[in-house]
Image (cartoon, rainbow, N blue to C red):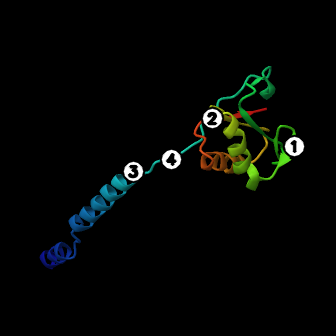
């Protein structure tokens, strides 16, 4: 009787080799697809507290963003939809003008991105971000 029981145990074993093959193929698939993810980020250089945005060259276009995301240009409030027109107008007189976006540290990031997108649409590629 003991001979029959050991034979029964041998027949009921499960071969795990095909399952391991599938696991390794899935692992290779995820490693290969994850390697192509390109994360983008904003490169931020902090300005020293003693420097102020008003010390910038007068030919630069300086947008200021307050803590509640209000956008100002040359002391007047500007709507996000008019940023492109203002940049085009100011660049008409000075083609070398750069756009500088000076934001409050608690301002939302999407405000900066929307201003930068509008400036790029106006033809400006040199856009800087400062915080205060």
Rendered-image quadrant of the N terminus: bottom left
Q: CA distance from mark 4 to mark 3?
A: 10 Å
Foreground mark, 1 or 2, reads 2
Indicate the secondary structure of the residue bearing disc 4: loop
Q: Earlier in the sequence, mark 1 or mark 2?
A: 1
Residue found at the very far top of the displayed protein: 50
Name the residue that disc number 4 marks: 39
Is mark 1 in CB contact (under 8 Å) with mark 4?
Answer: no
Please say if the residues under marks 3 and 1 sit with CB atoms less than 8 Å apart. Answer: no
In this rendering, the label closer to the viewer, 1 or 4? 1
Callout 4: few (<14), some (14-19), or many (20+) C-alpha neighbours within 10 Å? few
Query: Is residue 68 or residue 74 the one in the foreground?
Result: 74
Q: CA distance from mark 4 to mark 2?
A: 32 Å
Q: Mark 3: which secondary structure?
A: loop
Label 1: which secondary element? strand
Q: Residue furthest front?
A: 93
Which residue lies at the image location 27% right of the left edge and 65% below the top edge? 22
Q: Which residue is mark 3?
A: 36
Q: CA distance from mark 2 to mark 3?
A: 38 Å
Left or right: 93 with respect to 49?
left
The residue beneath circle 2 is: 95
Is residue 88 depicted above or below 5 in this figure?
above
Of pointers 3 and 1, the one earlier in the residue sequence: 3
Residue 76, disc: 1
Residue 34 position, x and y percent, is 40, 53
């Amino acid at each position: 009787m003991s001979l029959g029981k050991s034979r029964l145990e041998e027949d009921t074993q499960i071969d795990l080799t095909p399952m391991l093959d599938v696991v390794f193929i899935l692992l290779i698939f995820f490693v290969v697809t994850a390697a192509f993810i390109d994360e983008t980020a904003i490169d931020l250089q902090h300005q020293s507290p003693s420097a102020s945005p008003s010390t910038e060259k007068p030919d630069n276009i300086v947008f200021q963003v307050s803590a509640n995301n209000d956008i100002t240009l040359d002391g007047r409030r500007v709507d996000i939809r008019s940023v492109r027109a203002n940049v085009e107008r100011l660049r008409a007189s000075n083609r070398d003008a750069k756009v500088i976006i000076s934001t409050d540290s608690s301002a939302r990031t999407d405000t900066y991105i929307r201003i930068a997108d509008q400036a790029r649409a106006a033809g400006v590629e040199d856009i800087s971000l400062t915080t205060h």
